[in-house]
Image (tube, rainbow, N blue to C red):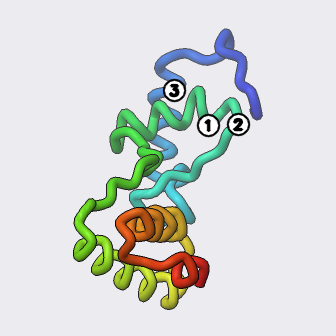
Amino acid sequence: MKEPDRNIYTDNDIAEYAEILKQTSAMKHGNNPASNKPKSSKEYKYKVIIKPIWEDLYGKVGRGLKTVVIPSSADALTDRLQLLLASKAAGNTGVRNELVSICDGLLMQKVMTKSFYKK
């Protein structure tokens, strides 16, 4: 059921369902037994039933970092900038926010010119 009625299943049913999910790897990404990544959803059944089972078996699922902490020294910023630019050139699309933060820091320290910043 998409939204199972709490009145028609027991704690024992949940325990049996958890065992089925574990044995079949049905809640793992790609149904891959070696995966440490859960299948996830914003739907009721995932949030109320499957996610708590996953957390009991494997621990909490994180959401990643929300804040980027960057160094303040110009040399460290420059080194990090070079690394991130190489990463971006290699296809990593998740570095833009940190690149902008580092460029802002270098611009404020007058290590980078506005014209270079725009490039």
Q: Residue at x 27, y 71 (%)?
A: 74
Residue 34 in sight from this viewpoint: no
Position of the C terminus by quadrant: bottom right
Q: For label 3, count other residues whose C-alpha is less than 10 Å away and answer few (under 14), some (14-19) or many (20+).
A: some
Looking at marks 1 and 3 on the same chain, the residue that comes earlier in the sequence is marked by 3
Instruction: Give SS at disc 3.
Output: helix
Q: Residue furthest top?
A: 7
**Marking on residue 43:** 2
Left or right: where 14 falls relative to 74: right
Nearer mark to the viewer, of 1 and 3: 1
Q: Which residue is mark 1?
A: 46
Dot 1 amino acid type: Tyr
Secondary structure of residue under mark 1: helix
Estimate the x, y position of residue 40 in percent, counting from the top left.
59, 48
Looking at the rendered structure, the number of numbered marks drawn on it comes to 3
Q: Position of residue 108 (x, y in %)?
A: 41, 63
Mark 2: amino acid: Glu
The residue beneath circle 3 is: 14
Q: Residues within 10 Å of mark 2 (few under 14, many from 20)?
A: few
